């Protein structure tokens, strides 16, 4: 089942765990998202976003070289309008709140059931493109 009808949202996947990137790539591609690039550390994430200008970035909070929150700052600064969804193994409210304050649109736990991932990413993307009052 394809979730996307008109514009196909483009995605950069950034996680230091290869199996997480692979799983996200498969799930999102099957749902109709276009995967532009992948990154295994925070610096790579920033560079891939500069190069490809994605609609959506799935960004791990705990990344080597440049941590997720630092990468988030640079990605949001370099790419106004990008929708960043933080990936996390733990969802302590302090970390999540800090990332939302820094510009993340949402967060996704890595243990989210596979059948819910694409729908949550798409809903976050749609929510970020809906003006207050429901007009798009």
Image: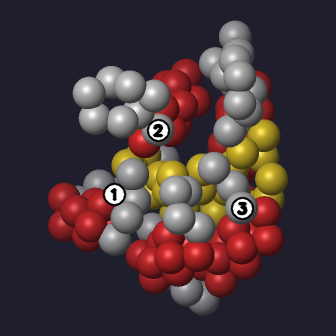
Which of disc 1 and disc 3 is earlier in sequence?
3
Residue on which the image places disc 2: 129
Mark toward the viewer: 1 or 2: 2
Query: What is the quadrant of the N terminus in the image?
Result: top right
Quarter of the image where one finds residue 114: top right
What crowding class fits label 3: few (fewer than 14 Cα within 10 Å), some (14-19), or many (20 or more)?
some
Q: Residue furthest bottom?
A: 65
**Structural distance between the alpha carbons of marks 3 and 2:** 16 Å
Q: Residue furthest top?
A: 1
At 59% from the left edge and 67% from the top edge, which residue is drawn?
A: 79
Mark 1 and mark 2 in contact? Answer it, CB < 8 Å: no
In the structure shown, which secondary structural element does the residue marked by tag 1 occupy? Answer: loop
Q: Residue furthest left?
A: 93
Mark toward the viewer: 3 or 1: 3
Residue on which the image places disc 3: 53
Closer to the camera in the image, 15 or 85:
85
Query: What is the quadrant of the C terminus in the image?
Result: top left
At 69% from the left edge and 49% from the top edge, which residue is drawn?
A: 11
* Residue 92: % across, % down: 23, 60
In the structure shown, which secondary structural element does the residue marked by tag 2 occupy? Answer: loop
Residue on which the image places disc 1: 90
Which of disc 2 and disc 3 is earlier in sequence?
3
Vertical relation: 32 (above or below) 40: above
In the structure shown, which secondary structural element does the residue marked by tag 3 occupy? Answer: loop
């Amino acid at each position: 089942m394809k979730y996307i009808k008109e514009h196909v949202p483009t995605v950069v996947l950034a996680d230091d765990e290869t199996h997480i990137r692979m799983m996200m790539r498969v799930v999102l591609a099957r749902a109709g998202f276009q995967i532009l690039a992948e990154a295994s550390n925070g610096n790579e994430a920033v560079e891939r976003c500069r190069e490809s200008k994605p609609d959506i970035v799935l960004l791990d909070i705990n990344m080597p070289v440049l941590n997720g929150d630092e990468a988030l700052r640079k990605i949001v600064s370099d790419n106004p309008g990008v929708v960043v969804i933080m990936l996390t193994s733990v969802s302590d409210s302090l970390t999540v709140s800090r990332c939302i304050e820094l510009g993340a649109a949402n967060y996704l736990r890595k243990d989210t059931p596979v059948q819910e991932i694409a729908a949550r990413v798409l809903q976050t993307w749609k929510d970020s493109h809906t003006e207050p009052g429901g007009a798009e």
